[in-house]
Amino acid sequence: MSITVLAGDFKKGRSNRFDRGVLHIFQDGKFFPAKIDGGQILAIDTATEENVKKMAGTLGWGATGAVLLGPVGAVVGALAGGNKKTVTFICALADGRKFLGEADANTYKQMSAQMFENNLKKERGIDPAAPPPKKEATPTGIKILLIAIIIMGIMIFVADGGK
């Protein structure tokens, strides 16, 4: 979920993240990150996509595999070190700010999905930055229970002859 800002209107660095539809991103001169609702994402476009191979991690797994399982283990261990896919992208926000960032593929997918939902809402005439509509204060089940209690009270009142 980590995002590295490479350039743009935000502080360069790695401590940024996109979590539960909110972009937590540091600004120059600020101690705490700004919390930007995902509804503010206007566009997100892939700048470049690359596979990043962590050589140290891969070699470490290969050595462990060789010790435990011999030469075959070295090959399996090297493969287990694996590739970590990162995506470099440009993100534009509703307030005009932009940044060039790098994130893991999953974070990029989440941000892209958020942008897609925003565009879908716009097509339907809904402001993507608007808070979701509030739910009913009293659930339907409680309303039915209250009506049933009132009806039972009236029936008891009428059965007693109004006394």
Image (cartoon, rainbow, N blue to C red):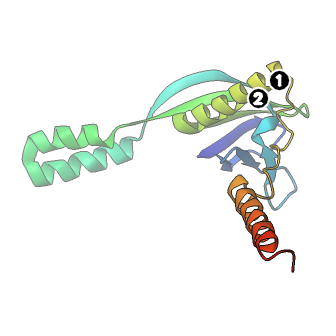
Q: Which residue is mark 2?
A: 118
Q: Residue at x 82, y 49 (%)?
A: 134
Closer to the camera in the image, 136 or 156:
156
Vertical arrangement, residue 73 with respect to residue 48, above or below: below
Determine crowd level at label 2: few under 14, some 14-19, many 20+ residues with C-alpha closer than 10 A: many
- Judged from the image, the secondary structure of the residue bearing numbered disc 2 is helix
Quarter containing the C terminus: bottom right
Badges 1 and 2: C-beta atoms under 8 Å apart?
Answer: yes
Residue that appears at 75% across and 30% down: 91
Distance of label 1 from label 2 (alpha carbons)? 6 Å
Q: In the rendered view, would you say 162 is above or below 3?
A: below
Q: Residue 127, percent across and down? A: 87, 31
Q: Is residue 21 left or right of residue 8?
A: left
Q: Quadrant of residue 110?
A: top right
Label 1 sits on residue: 122
Q: Residues within 10 Å of mark 1 (few under 14, many from 20)?
A: few
> Left of 107 or right of it: where is 129?
right
